[in-house]
């Protein structure tokens, strides 16, 4: 039988896991619907996105630079959840909670990875490394969102934005845009319109 202390510990692990997904989504400009740590029959917590389109035409994957940027950002979001949980609680069963995240990342990697096995391995390590850097650089944001989840159990997109903006005192993405030159901006600041099936990141 699960004790109250064990259940509370598991809830905190879930909050940091889902906060990792949510903060990565915010800074990579991947739209979300909401994030919750209210368990259901399938997961202990979940972050849901609006419908996402990864194809240029029905049955044709969008392999343009912008089209590839989209799944790359979603793969980083997938990795950020378990990495945040591991940073918060290295001894937790973070790999178990990452099962669905790794599967979702793998499905997207198949679409965009280098056909050469070594190239594919290095590509995956690159995206995993980008997720590690994001979690490290935005740890204060992850802590703030996790604590808000523990308090409220569910945050919609506006709620996540508000928590992160309180950490910085400003809207961080707007500040970054002001710092960038008007020409030659990274494709990472482009927020595409999404259509297609729902994609969720769950633990």
Image (tube, helix red, strand yellow):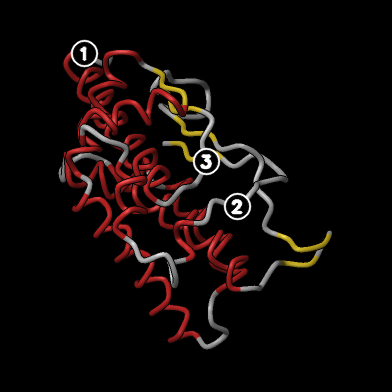
Where is 34 relative to 108, above or below? above
Depth check, front residue: 128 or 173:
173
- Do residues under tags 2 and 1 come within 8 Å of each other at their CB atoms? no
Q: Position of residue 143 (x, y in %)?
A: 20, 33
Residue 87 against residue 4 in the figure, above or below: below
Q: Are marks 3 and 1 in contact (CB under 8 Å)?
A: no
Residue in the image at 46% along x and 31% along y: 46
Please report whichever mark, 3 or 1, sits nearer to the chain's N-terminal start.
Answer: 1
On the image, the x and y values in percent for residue 189 come to: 45, 56
| Res. 151 image quadrant | top left
Query: Where does label 3 land, which residue?
Result: 31
Q: Residue at x 18, y 46 (%)?
A: 87
Q: Quadrant of the C terminus?
A: top left
Q: Identify the residue at image location x=49%, y=54%.
A: 74
Circle 1 sits on which residue?
A: 3
Mark 3–mark 1 distance (CA, rounded to whole Å): 36 Å
- What secondary structure is found at the residue carrying circle 1? loop
Left or right of 189: which side holds 163?
left
């Amino acid at each position: 039988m699960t004790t109250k202390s064990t259940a509370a510990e598991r809830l905190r692990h879930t909050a940091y896991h889902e906060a990792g997904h949510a903060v990565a989504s915010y800074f990579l400009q991947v739209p979300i619907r909401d994030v919750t740590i209210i368990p259901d029959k399938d997961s202990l917590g979940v972050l849901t996105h609006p419908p996402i389109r990864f194809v240029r035409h029905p049955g044709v994957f969008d392999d343009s630079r912008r089209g590839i940027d989209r799944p790359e950002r979603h793969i980083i979001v997938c990795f950020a959840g378990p990495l945040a949980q591991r940073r918060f609680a290295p001894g937790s069963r973070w790999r178990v909670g990452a099962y669905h995240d790794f599967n979702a990342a793998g499905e997207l990697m198949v679409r965009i990875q280098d056909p050469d096995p070594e190239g594919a391995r290095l590509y995956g390590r690159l995206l995993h490394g980008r997720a590690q850097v994001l979690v490290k650089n935005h740890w204060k944001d992850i802590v703030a969102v996790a604590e808000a989840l523990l308090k409220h159990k569910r945050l919609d997109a506006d709620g996540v934005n508000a928590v992160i903006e309180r950490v910085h005192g400003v809207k961080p993405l707007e500040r970054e845009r002001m710092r960038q030159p008007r020409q030659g901006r990274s494709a990472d600041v482009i927020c595409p319109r999404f259509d297609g099936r729902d994609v969720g990141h769950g633990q």
